[in-house]
Amino acid sequence: MPSLSALRAFDAVAREGGFAAAAATLNVTEAAMRQHIRALERDLGRPLVERRGRGIALTDAGRTLADATRGGFDALFAGVEALTDDDADRPVRVALPPSFAEMWLMPRLGDFWRLNPDIAVELAPSLRLVDLRGGRFDLAIRYGLGDWPGCRSVLLASADYLVVARADLGAKQAGVARADLAALPWLFEAGRDEHRTWAAAHGVDFDGPRAKRFPTNALVLSAVRAGQGVSLQARALVERELDSGVLTALYAEPSDPLGYYVVTQDDPRPLARRFIAWLLDRA
């Protein structure tokens, strides 16, 4: 089988009726086009193009090959276009932690759809670290240091840790010292290993009798709002409730460079880029 590049060059020459116009179409030099045609003629053992006056014409063999390449490349272009159109219409798929989806993204997502009514977004909340290879997901929002191998990451939101309580109860305990944290009635999400690590570093017994554990962060925050205890939360997840006065912060601690990051594998497709740009703008 001759070189596909040479066949593509010949197809362009046949369509455009000349080397210069074909070279401009493929964004290569005219010399490169002529070299491709000479190589193709050597491979096939017969002339395909002949000089006629100031222009060129196809030989009988050239016209036969031109009919074949035109049909072949037209079919190839149609297939690629169909796949591209399908990809363009596919919803933007986002993998992210459940707590971030509920507390940070969902209250803002209506604004995205108001500005971008043509873009569908599918969320896949999970504590599992998904593999971005293979194209199943356009992007992920991950909690960590932003250093996932083989991925590009951009800081989206701070994960500064706050100890929060219902506002009316927290007012009585404002300004808690680090040494007093162990005495507080704690509410934890059972599967959050980073919270377990933080608790151990601050003298708080994650599994102790004064601590209650729940399967999701949503239940933890529901218990905090009900006044059942205090909770460790990333600032990004509770900033709206802090601003509205529902919750109050008893203790704050910076977590840099820990944070929530937008993570991608390669250059995202256009719809995903629009979603990422909106995320960063809102953050």
Image (tube, helix red, strand yellow):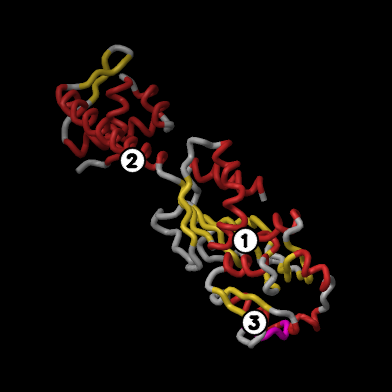
Give percent across and percent down for residue 265.
Answer: 49, 56
At label 3, the amino acid type is: Ala
- The residue located at (36%, 25%) in the rendering is 22
Based on the displayed image, in which of its 4 quarters is residue 230 positioned?
Answer: bottom right
- Quadrant containing the N terminus is top left
Secondary structure found at label 2: helix
State which mark lies toward you, 2 or 3. Answer: 3
**Label 1: how many Cα within 10 Å (few below 14, some 14–19, many 20+):** many
Identify the residue under disc 3.
211
Q: Is residue 28 left or right of residue 104?
A: left
Residue 166 is one of the magenta-drawn residues: no
Circle 1 or circle 2, nearest the eye: 1
Relative to the observer, which residue lies in front, 109 or 39?
A: 109
The disc, 2 or 3, on the residue closer to the chain's N-terminal end is 2
Vertical placement of residue 156 versus 23, above or below? below
The magenta-colored residue range is 202-206
Residue 227 or residue 273, whichever sits in front: 227
Placement of 216 over or under 6, stated as above or below: below
Helix, strand or loop for disc 3: strand
